[in-house]
């Protein structure tokens, strides 16, 4: 018995020693949480959406994040909140330890030019119950049914005098949003359920050719097993609130954002941010799922499961692009992942969380706001890092603001210091469109950043800025892949430029290449650090009667940073109308002149190849595949961890925010007319060209929004047949007489819109059809839709406007209708309508370059 007791005591002592050693080894392995940035402090709001009248079964929608500065309302179109016939809105405030002291709201038209209502909410309509406050809003009867407006809500709390929230609202004559939202929530829940997941099979459009190897991005064409998470068996950490993105007739677009966790191969939980997008169509018999997409991004956590001696595993991601840089000696690697930026010290086997907007395990919905991004600027051999944070700041000194911050991390002091903050009054996705194209900091503490249509040079030592380039358009400038050289056309014209310039952002040196007399130059892109540009005779720049410009370049040149020619291409009888520069190749779009020399026709493309450079990088990103998680993104490094020390995950001692280095750039309010493409739950792109915007929106079943906030184009249900019967010509024209035909067509469009005038002399005087339409019709806009497809321009026909089209470069028609098989056209030669099969007509227009003019 005594021996048994002795053995038990010995075992107990051994166990205690082992536990003690474990805690000693791991005593500073990882801090409990990131307290450096502080917790989010702002409240959030959502709305209780009902059917046609209020009910106890209202569904919570559109959880919104607050802004502490007033934003430009017409760019805040993330959500739309359906309201019922009673025009009552219940706002649900998640206080997040705030006390709501007061509330005010205003309603504006989409262009924000007209204030419909501005009202302070009475105290008796603000009721706090524990963690939530309900605010009842009664809208005036000034709003029109089925018309969108902006609703701006301003809260006053004990912590902040002003917290702003933005959404669109729409009073629907037929409101089926509740049923559609319940469908989306049920579909999402079914993917997690072993017993209900089969309910979604009938809604899928599984395609055998679809890639089912990445949980980071699945869609309606993915396999059933892929959509139901394979073997991951995830659990929801936060409950999603439906976000209503668009209400387009019988079609609704909805988004769910939430956090999940799932066990990995080591039986440890890993956390992910999930976004689901639904595009559904309501009918009286059932709801159809038109489109579905789900993205999944792992929230990085520094531990031995994610970091090995030669690799950093970033886990499941929707794309394989990784923002990272390493020091020259590869001892340090800085990388961004899902709302955070990290530094790996390979020599010491330490990982520093330099900046984080999100806690890994928290269930706070504010952490799922990923309207921000990071860019690593530089990493030196001492572990010092410069990095940019831009977008919505969900915690810290600038919480509730949108802007651009430059930070420096001092590795020796373990200190992050903000060098400058530039506030921005539009949404992150608009900021990202330009920030993603150009942002650079050189060794002289000069920061270059592209905002709107300009490039600014900012002296970080004195917080002064200079606008170094302005009036940039998407087709008149280019940036090299390293982001340290920018080239642009100095004239800013769509007919080429008298010179092009290159600016080396590292040393500020500028190079100018001037065109010869009678020539124009056009920037096409970069091959490495070498600029690709075209040279055209002014006589080869052709503008047709609709104002379409073709710059026929007879020579393409590749030049180095000093402007010296390295290589060129030209061929007799061929012209280059455009180029696509990617990796090590330039694909030239070639055209040839028609016999009369008045226009160009398509020819075969031609490729120019640059000098292939061997990839000698010792730090690289890539993909690994595992049975459980499938594709995972990794950063691999040659210089392996050799120390025997345990991995440590650390935070900076302090993040110092700057109170004096906030820089407001006045010119940001400018930028010219743009077209904004929204689709699949987010902004897809911003374009200067309406045709490019429509083509992009069509690919994502989205919408195009003008600078004024109006719809320019939308992918939505259209009638199966439609015809304009009140469009007529005042006469006829001879076949081949393009000027007379065009005059009749434009005049018919004007008459259809209540304007009766003769415009033949104006066309003969050089005005384009779009110019004439814009001058004669005050409340509508003429659109040059060159490049769009026939199916895309039919949107304008069923919205009540004829579309002008060129059939062969010389003759014109007006498209006035369609049915399931045919398109209906009005011929100015005969004055009569006729039908042509949609496929045949589409091919005819395509062969002519798809030249269309429409009105919106």
Image: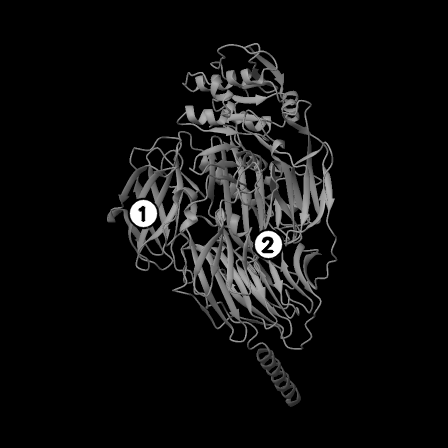
Per the model, the C-alpha gap separating discs 2 and 1 is 52 Å
Task: Note whether 786 is above or below 449 in the view shown.
Answer: above
Which marked residue is nearer to the observer: mark 2 or mark 1? 2
The colour scheme used here is: one colour
Disc 1 crowd, CA 10 A, few/some/many (<14, 14-19, 20+): many
Q: Nearer the viewer, residue 250 or 590?
A: 590
What kind of element bears circle 2? strand
Give the residue displayed 58% in from the left and 46% down from the top: 500
Q: Which numbered tag is attached to residue 685?
A: none
Q: Residue at position x 34%, y 44% from top?
A: 90
From the image, tell me which residue sits under label 1: 135
Assign the N terminus to one quadrant of the image.
Answer: bottom right
Dots 2 and 1: beta carbons under 8 Å?
Answer: no
Image position, residue 381 (x, y; %): 61, 71
Label 1 secondary element = strand
The answer, for residue 228, to whether it is visible in the render is no
Q: Position of residue 762 (x, y in %)?
A: 47, 21
How many tags in the picture?
2
Camera-side residue: 156 or 727?
A: 727
Percent across and percent down for residue 9 are: 61, 86
**Where is mark 2, residue-wise?**
485
Residue 477: x and y, percent?
57, 46
Question: Which numbered disc, 2 or 1, marks the residue that appears first in the sequence?
Answer: 1
**Can residue 5 be spotted in the picture?**
yes
Which quadrant of the figure has residue 557?
top right
Q: Residue furthest bottom?
A: 2
Quadrant of residue 556 within the rendered picture: top right
Q: Is 817 left, or right, of 210 in this rendering?
A: left
Question: Camera-side residue: 138 or 584?
Answer: 584
Query: How many C-alpha atoms fall within 10 Å of the one at disc 2: few (<14), some, or many (≥20)?
Result: many
């Amino acid at each position: 018995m005594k021996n048994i007791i002795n053995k038990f005591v010995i075992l107990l002592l051994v166990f205690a020693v082992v536990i003690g050693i474990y805690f000693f080894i791991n005593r500073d392995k990882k801090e409990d949480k990131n307290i450096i940035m502080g917790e989010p402090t702002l409240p959030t709001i959502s709305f209780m959406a009902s059917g046609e009248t209020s009910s106890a079964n209202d569904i919570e929608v559109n959880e919104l994040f607050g802004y502490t500065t007033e934003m430009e309302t017409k760019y805040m179109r993330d959500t739309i909140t359906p309201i019922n016939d009673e025009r009552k809105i219940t706002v649900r405030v998640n206080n997040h330890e705030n006390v709501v002291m007061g509330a005010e709201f205003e309603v504006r038209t989409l262009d924000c030019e007209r204030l419909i209502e501005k009202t302070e909410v009475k105290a008796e309509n603000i009721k706090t119950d524990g963690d939530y406050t309900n605010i009842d809003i009664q809208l005036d009867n000034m709003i029109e049914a089925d018309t969108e407006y902006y609703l701006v809500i301003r809260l006053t709390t004990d912590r902040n005098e002003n917290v702003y929230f933005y959404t669109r609202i729409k009073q629907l004559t037929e409101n089926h949003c509740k049923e559609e939202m319940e469908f989306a929530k049920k579909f999402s829940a079914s993917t997690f359920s072993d017993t209900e997941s089969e309910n979604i099979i009938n809604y899928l459009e599984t395609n055998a050719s679809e890639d089912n190897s990445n949980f980071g991005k699945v869609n309606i064409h993915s396999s059933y097993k892929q959509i139901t998470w394979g073997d991951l068996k995830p659990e929801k950490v936060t409950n999603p609130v439906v976000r209503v993105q668009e209400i387009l007739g019988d079609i609704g677009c909805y988004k769910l954002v939430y956090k999940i966790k799932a066990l990995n191969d080591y039986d440890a939980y890993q956390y992910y941010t999930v976004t689901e997008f639904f595009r559904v169509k309501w009918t009286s018999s059932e709801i159809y799922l038109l489109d579905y997409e789900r993205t999944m991004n792992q929230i990085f956590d520094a531990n031995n499961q994610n970091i090995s001696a030669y690799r950093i595993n970033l886990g499941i991601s929707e794309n394989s692009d990784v923002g990272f840089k390493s020091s020259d000696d590869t001892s340090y690697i800085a990388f961004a992942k899902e709302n955070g930026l990290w530094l790996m010290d390979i020599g010491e086997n330490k990982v520093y969380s330099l900046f984080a907007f999100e806690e890994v395990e928290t269930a706070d919905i504010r952490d799922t706001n990923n309207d921000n991004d990071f860019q690593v600027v530089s990493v030196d051999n001492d572990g010092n890092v410069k990095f940019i944070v831009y977008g919505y700041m969900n915690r810290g000194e600038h919480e509730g603001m949108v802007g651009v911050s430059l930070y420096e991390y001092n590795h020796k002091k373990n200190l992050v210091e903000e060098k400058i903050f530039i506030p921005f009054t539009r949404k992150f996705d608009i900021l990202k469109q330009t920030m993603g194209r150009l942002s650079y900091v050189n060794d002289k503490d000069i920061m270059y950043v592209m905002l709107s249509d300009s490039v600014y040079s900012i002296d970080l030592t004195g917080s002064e800025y200079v606008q170094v380039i302005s009036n940039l358009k998407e087709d008149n400038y280019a940036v090299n892949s390293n982001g340290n050289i920018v080239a642009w056309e100095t004239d800013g014209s769509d007919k080429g430029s008298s010179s092009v310039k290159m600016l080396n952002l590292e040393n500020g040196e500028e190079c100018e290449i001037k065109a010869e007399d009678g020539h124009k130059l056009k920037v096409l892109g970069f091959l490495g650090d070498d600029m690709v540009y075209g040279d055209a005779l002014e006589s080869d720049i052709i503008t047709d009667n609709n104002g379409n410009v073709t710059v026929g370049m007879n020579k393409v040149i590749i030049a180095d940073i000093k402007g010296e020619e390295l290589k060129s291409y030209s061929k007799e009888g061929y012209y280059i109308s455009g180029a696509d520069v990617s990796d090590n190749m330039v694909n030239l779009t070639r055209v040839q002149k028609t016999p009369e020399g008045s226009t160009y026709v398509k020819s075969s493309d031609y490729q120019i190849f640059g000098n292939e450079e061997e990839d000698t990088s010792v730090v690289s990103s890539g993909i690994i595949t595992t049975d459980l998680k499938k594709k995972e993104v990794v950063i691999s490094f040659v210089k392996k961890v050799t120390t025997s020390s345990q991995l440590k995950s650390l935070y900076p001692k302090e993040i110092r925010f700057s109170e004096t280095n906030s820089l407001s750039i006045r010119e940001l309010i400018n930028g010219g007319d743009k077209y904004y493409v929204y689709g699949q739950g987010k902004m897809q792109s911003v374009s200067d060209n309406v045709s490019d915007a429509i083509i992009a929106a069509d690919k994502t079943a989205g919408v195009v929004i003008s600078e004024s906030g109006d719809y320019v184009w939308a992918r939505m249900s259209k009638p199966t047949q439609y015809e304009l019967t009140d469009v007529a010509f005042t006469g006829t024209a001879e076949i081949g007489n393009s000027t007379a035909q065009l005059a009749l067509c434009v005049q018919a469009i004007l008459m259809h819109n209540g304007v009766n005038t003769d415009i033949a002399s104006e066309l003969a005087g050089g005005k384009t059809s779009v110019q004439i339409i814009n001058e004669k019709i005050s409340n509508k806009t003429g659109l040059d839709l060159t490049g769009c497809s026939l199916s895309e321009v039919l949107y304008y026909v069923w919205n009540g406007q004829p579309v002008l089209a060129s059939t062969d470069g010389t003759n014109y028609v007006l498209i006035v209708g369609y049915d399931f098989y045919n398109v209906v056209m009005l011929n100015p030669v005969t004055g009569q309508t006729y039908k042509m099969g949609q496929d045949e007509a589409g091919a005819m227009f395509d062969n002519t370059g798809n030249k269309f003019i429409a009105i919106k």
